[in-house]
Amino acid sequence: MIGFAARSLFTGYGWSFIRHVALPHPLKTLLAIRRARRATGASDGSVSTSATAGDTQKQRGRITGVGFCLKPAENRCPSKGDLHGCNYLENNFPKNTNKLPAPCKDCYIREIGAAALQSGGAFYVMTSAKDILFDVFKPAMDQGVFRHGRFLLCRYSFQPFLVGLYASGIDGTLYPFCSGDCRDYKTWLKADRGIKDEQTSIAAETHAKLAERIEGESNQAGNVVRVERRGNIYYPLFEE
Protein backbone atom coordinates (compact mmCIF):
# COMPACT_ATOMS: atom_id res chain seq x y z
CA MET A 1 0.00 0.00 0.00
CA ILE A 2 2.93 2.36 0.64
CA GLY A 3 4.05 1.99 -2.96
CA PHE A 4 0.52 2.62 -4.23
CA ALA A 5 0.19 5.73 -2.06
CA ALA A 6 3.58 7.10 -3.17
CA ARG A 7 2.71 6.68 -6.85
CA SER A 8 -0.71 8.28 -6.36
CA LEU A 9 0.57 11.24 -4.37
CA PHE A 10 0.80 13.59 -7.33
CA THR A 11 -2.34 12.44 -9.10
CA GLY A 12 -5.67 14.25 -8.90
CA TYR A 13 -6.90 11.64 -6.44
CA GLY A 14 -3.80 11.93 -4.26
CA TRP A 15 -4.05 15.68 -3.91
CA SER A 16 -7.80 15.51 -3.33
CA PHE A 17 -7.44 12.86 -0.64
CA ILE A 18 -4.80 14.91 1.17
CA ARG A 19 -6.84 18.12 0.96
CA HIS A 20 -10.27 16.75 1.82
CA VAL A 21 -9.46 13.81 4.12
CA ALA A 22 -5.91 13.68 5.44
CA LEU A 23 -5.44 17.35 6.36
CA PRO A 24 -8.89 17.91 7.92
CA HIS A 25 -8.80 14.55 9.71
CA PRO A 26 -5.14 13.55 10.28
CA LEU A 27 -5.70 11.19 13.23
CA LYS A 28 -8.65 9.48 11.58
CA THR A 29 -6.59 9.04 8.40
CA LEU A 30 -3.62 7.53 10.24
CA LEU A 31 -5.89 5.11 12.07
CA ALA A 32 -7.59 4.22 8.77
CA ILE A 33 -4.24 3.42 7.14
CA ARG A 34 -3.20 1.32 10.11
CA ARG A 35 -6.46 -0.65 10.14
CA ALA A 36 -6.37 -1.15 6.36
CA ARG A 37 -2.86 -2.63 6.54
CA ARG A 38 -4.00 -5.08 9.22
CA ALA A 39 -7.21 -6.16 7.51
CA THR A 40 -7.48 -9.85 6.68
CA GLY A 41 -9.66 -11.61 4.16
CA ALA A 42 -12.27 -14.35 4.43
CA SER A 43 -12.07 -17.68 2.65
CA ASP A 44 -13.86 -16.27 -0.40
CA GLY A 45 -11.36 -13.42 -0.72
CA SER A 46 -13.69 -10.76 0.64
CA VAL A 47 -12.54 -8.24 3.25
CA SER A 48 -14.78 -6.40 5.73
CA THR A 49 -14.13 -3.28 7.74
CA SER A 50 -15.68 -4.84 10.83
CA ALA A 51 -16.90 -8.20 12.06
CA THR A 52 -20.51 -7.33 11.28
CA ALA A 53 -19.93 -4.98 8.37
CA GLY A 54 -20.99 -4.81 4.78
CA ASP A 55 -24.04 -6.96 4.29
CA THR A 56 -26.83 -5.63 6.46
CA GLN A 57 -30.59 -5.67 6.56
CA LYS A 58 -30.69 -1.88 7.00
CA GLN A 59 -31.96 -0.12 3.88
CA ARG A 60 -31.17 3.53 4.47
CA GLY A 61 -27.57 4.55 4.02
CA ARG A 62 -26.63 1.37 2.15
CA ILE A 63 -24.81 1.36 -1.16
CA THR A 64 -23.63 -1.30 -3.59
CA GLY A 65 -20.71 -0.28 -5.79
CA VAL A 66 -19.22 -2.21 -8.71
CA GLY A 67 -16.30 -1.50 -11.01
CA PHE A 68 -17.26 -0.22 -14.47
CA CYS A 69 -15.01 -2.92 -15.94
CA LEU A 70 -17.82 -5.43 -15.32
CA LYS A 71 -19.54 -3.90 -18.32
CA PRO A 72 -19.49 -5.86 -21.60
CA ALA A 73 -16.07 -5.78 -23.20
CA GLU A 74 -15.12 -4.38 -26.61
CA ASN A 75 -17.03 -1.17 -25.96
CA ARG A 76 -20.39 -2.85 -26.62
CA CYS A 77 -22.26 -1.34 -23.65
CA PRO A 78 -25.16 0.96 -24.69
CA SER A 79 -23.94 3.34 -21.97
CA LYS A 80 -20.33 3.24 -23.19
CA GLY A 81 -20.18 7.03 -23.33
CA ASP A 82 -21.11 7.24 -19.64
CA LEU A 83 -18.94 4.97 -17.50
CA HIS A 84 -21.09 5.64 -14.40
CA GLY A 85 -24.28 4.91 -16.30
CA CYS A 86 -26.43 1.87 -17.05
CA ASN A 87 -28.97 2.03 -19.87
CA TYR A 88 -31.16 -0.58 -18.19
CA LEU A 89 -31.33 1.26 -14.88
CA GLU A 90 -31.87 4.61 -16.63
CA ASN A 91 -35.06 3.14 -18.09
CA ASN A 92 -36.33 1.96 -14.71
CA PHE A 93 -36.21 -1.80 -15.15
CA PRO A 94 -37.97 -2.54 -18.46
CA LYS A 95 -39.94 -5.68 -17.74
CA ASN A 96 -39.59 -7.21 -21.19
CA THR A 97 -35.94 -8.27 -21.21
CA ASN A 98 -36.38 -9.68 -24.73
CA LYS A 99 -36.21 -6.11 -25.99
CA LEU A 100 -32.94 -5.39 -24.24
CA PRO A 101 -29.81 -4.83 -26.33
CA ALA A 102 -27.90 -8.12 -26.55
CA PRO A 103 -24.96 -6.94 -24.35
CA CYS A 104 -27.38 -6.04 -21.53
CA LYS A 105 -28.92 -9.49 -21.26
CA ASP A 106 -25.81 -11.07 -19.77
CA CYS A 107 -24.44 -7.97 -18.03
CA TYR A 108 -23.85 -8.46 -14.31
CA ILE A 109 -24.06 -4.73 -13.65
CA ARG A 110 -27.64 -4.82 -14.90
CA GLU A 111 -28.39 -7.83 -12.71
CA ILE A 112 -26.87 -6.68 -9.43
CA GLY A 113 -27.87 -3.05 -9.99
CA ALA A 114 -31.53 -3.88 -10.38
CA ALA A 115 -31.44 -6.26 -7.40
CA ALA A 116 -29.65 -3.79 -5.14
CA LEU A 117 -32.06 -0.98 -5.96
CA GLN A 118 -35.12 -3.17 -5.54
CA SER A 119 -33.75 -4.17 -2.14
CA GLY A 120 -33.84 -0.52 -1.08
CA GLY A 121 -30.17 0.46 -1.35
CA ALA A 122 -28.30 2.88 -3.61
CA PHE A 123 -26.25 1.61 -6.55
CA TYR A 124 -23.04 3.00 -7.98
CA VAL A 125 -20.95 2.10 -11.03
CA MET A 126 -17.45 3.00 -9.89
CA THR A 127 -14.82 4.54 -12.14
CA SER A 128 -11.95 6.72 -10.97
CA ALA A 129 -10.64 6.87 -7.41
CA LYS A 130 -11.27 10.63 -7.38
CA ASP A 131 -14.92 10.13 -8.31
CA ILE A 132 -15.31 7.53 -5.56
CA LEU A 133 -13.79 9.96 -3.07
CA PHE A 134 -16.33 12.69 -3.87
CA ASP A 135 -19.31 10.45 -4.65
CA VAL A 136 -19.04 8.07 -1.68
CA PHE A 137 -16.30 8.66 0.89
CA LYS A 138 -16.63 12.41 1.43
CA PRO A 139 -20.47 12.44 1.62
CA ALA A 140 -20.24 9.60 4.14
CA MET A 141 -17.58 11.40 6.17
CA ASP A 142 -19.20 14.84 6.14
CA GLN A 143 -22.92 14.03 6.18
CA GLY A 144 -23.26 10.35 7.02
CA VAL A 145 -24.96 9.69 3.67
CA PHE A 146 -23.68 6.11 3.50
CA ARG A 147 -23.17 3.86 6.49
CA HIS A 148 -23.13 0.38 4.98
CA GLY A 149 -21.87 -0.93 1.69
CA ARG A 150 -20.61 -3.73 -0.50
CA PHE A 151 -18.17 -3.14 -3.28
CA LEU A 152 -16.84 -5.27 -6.15
CA LEU A 153 -13.35 -4.35 -7.31
CA CYS A 154 -9.88 -5.70 -8.04
CA ARG A 155 -7.76 -7.01 -5.17
CA TYR A 156 -5.04 -4.54 -6.12
CA SER A 157 -7.31 -1.73 -4.94
CA PHE A 158 -8.40 -3.34 -1.68
CA GLN A 159 -6.07 -1.65 0.81
CA PRO A 160 -6.42 1.90 -0.60
CA PHE A 161 -10.19 1.41 -0.77
CA LEU A 162 -10.25 0.18 2.83
CA VAL A 163 -8.51 3.37 3.92
CA GLY A 164 -11.40 5.32 2.40
CA LEU A 165 -13.99 3.13 4.11
CA TYR A 166 -12.36 3.37 7.53
CA ALA A 167 -11.78 7.13 7.25
CA SER A 168 -15.35 7.81 6.11
CA GLY A 169 -16.98 5.51 8.69
CA ILE A 170 -18.58 3.09 6.23
CA ASP A 171 -19.04 -0.50 7.39
CA GLY A 172 -18.36 -2.31 4.17
CA THR A 173 -17.34 -5.54 2.52
CA LEU A 174 -15.06 -5.73 -0.51
CA TYR A 175 -15.50 -8.59 -2.97
CA PRO A 176 -12.74 -9.38 -5.49
CA PHE A 177 -12.93 -9.91 -9.21
CA CYS A 178 -11.66 -13.33 -10.19
CA SER A 179 -10.52 -12.52 -13.72
CA GLY A 180 -9.70 -9.57 -15.93
CA ASP A 181 -8.76 -7.43 -12.93
CA CYS A 182 -5.86 -5.00 -12.51
CA ARG A 183 -2.76 -6.65 -11.07
CA ASP A 184 -0.27 -3.74 -11.20
CA TYR A 185 -0.22 0.04 -10.93
CA LYS A 186 0.17 0.68 -14.66
CA THR A 187 -2.98 -1.29 -15.48
CA TRP A 188 -4.83 0.24 -12.54
CA LEU A 189 -3.91 3.76 -13.61
CA LYS A 190 -5.29 3.17 -17.11
CA ALA A 191 -8.51 1.79 -15.66
CA ASP A 192 -8.70 4.78 -13.32
CA ARG A 193 -8.83 6.91 -16.48
CA GLY A 194 -11.62 4.77 -17.93
CA ILE A 195 -9.38 2.69 -20.20
CA LYS A 196 -10.12 -1.01 -19.65
CA ASP A 197 -10.63 -3.28 -22.62
CA GLU A 198 -10.71 -6.55 -20.71
CA GLN A 199 -13.99 -7.34 -18.94
CA THR A 200 -13.80 -8.47 -15.34
CA SER A 201 -15.88 -11.17 -13.66
CA ILE A 202 -16.63 -12.53 -10.20
CA ALA A 203 -16.46 -16.09 -8.91
CA ALA A 204 -19.57 -18.27 -8.88
CA GLU A 205 -19.33 -18.44 -5.08
CA THR A 206 -19.37 -14.65 -4.82
CA HIS A 207 -22.27 -14.41 -7.28
CA ALA A 208 -24.36 -16.86 -5.26
CA LYS A 209 -23.53 -15.21 -1.94
CA LEU A 210 -24.45 -11.73 -3.16
CA ALA A 211 -27.69 -12.95 -4.72
CA GLU A 212 -28.72 -14.62 -1.46
CA ARG A 213 -27.93 -11.61 0.69
CA ILE A 214 -29.55 -9.06 -1.58
CA GLU A 215 -32.66 -11.21 -1.85
CA GLY A 216 -32.84 -11.29 1.94
CA GLU A 217 -32.66 -7.51 2.03
CA SER A 218 -35.41 -7.24 -0.58
CA ASN A 219 -37.79 -8.95 1.82
CA GLN A 220 -37.24 -6.08 4.26
CA ALA A 221 -37.47 -3.25 1.71
CA GLY A 222 -40.43 -1.01 1.04
CA ASN A 223 -42.22 -0.76 -2.29
CA VAL A 224 -39.66 0.64 -4.72
CA VAL A 225 -41.58 2.32 -7.53
CA ARG A 226 -38.80 3.73 -9.69
CA VAL A 227 -35.15 4.71 -9.84
CA GLU A 228 -33.65 8.19 -9.76
CA ARG A 229 -30.10 9.10 -10.70
CA ARG A 230 -28.49 11.86 -8.65
CA GLY A 231 -25.08 12.75 -9.94
CA ASN A 232 -23.31 9.45 -10.52
CA ILE A 233 -25.40 7.33 -8.13
CA TYR A 234 -28.75 5.58 -8.56
CA TYR A 235 -31.29 5.72 -5.74
CA PRO A 236 -34.58 3.84 -5.28
CA LEU A 237 -37.72 5.91 -4.84
CA PHE A 238 -40.28 4.39 -2.50
CA GLU A 239 -44.05 4.54 -2.61
CA GLU A 240 -45.33 7.01 -0.05
Image (tube, rainbow, N blue to C red):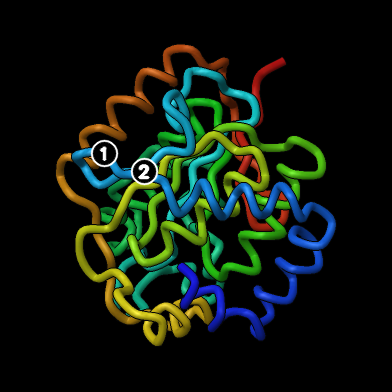
Q: In this orientation, which residue lies closer to the viewer: 198 or 228? A: 198
Label 1 sits on what residue type? Answer: Ala
**Left or right, residue 60 beside residue 97:** right
User: Looking at the picture, does residue 133 appear above or below residue 184?
Assistant: above
Residue annotated with mark 2: 47
Where's residue 207, x and y in %? 23, 41
Label 2 sits on what residue type? Answer: Val
The secondary element bearing badge 1 is classed as: loop
Q: Residue at x 41, y 81 (%)?
A: 185
Where's residue 46, x and y in %? 31, 44
Q: Are marks 2 and 1 in contact (CB under 8 Å)?
A: yes
Residue 14 image label: none
Where's residue 47, x and y in %? 36, 43
Q: In this orientation, which residue lies closer to the viewer: 16 or 200? A: 16
Q: Earlier in the sequence, mark 2 or mark 1?
A: 1
Label 1 Cα crowd, 10 Å radius (few <14 / some 14-19 / many 20+): few
Residue 42 image label: 1
The secondary element bearing badge 2 is classed as: strand
**Left or right, residue 122 beside residue 217:** right
Where's residue 125, x and y in %? 51, 57
**Left or right, residue 25 beside residue 186:** right
Query: CA–CA distance between discs 2 and 1?
Result: 6 Å
Q: In this orientation, which residue lies closer to the viewer: 172 or 39? A: 39
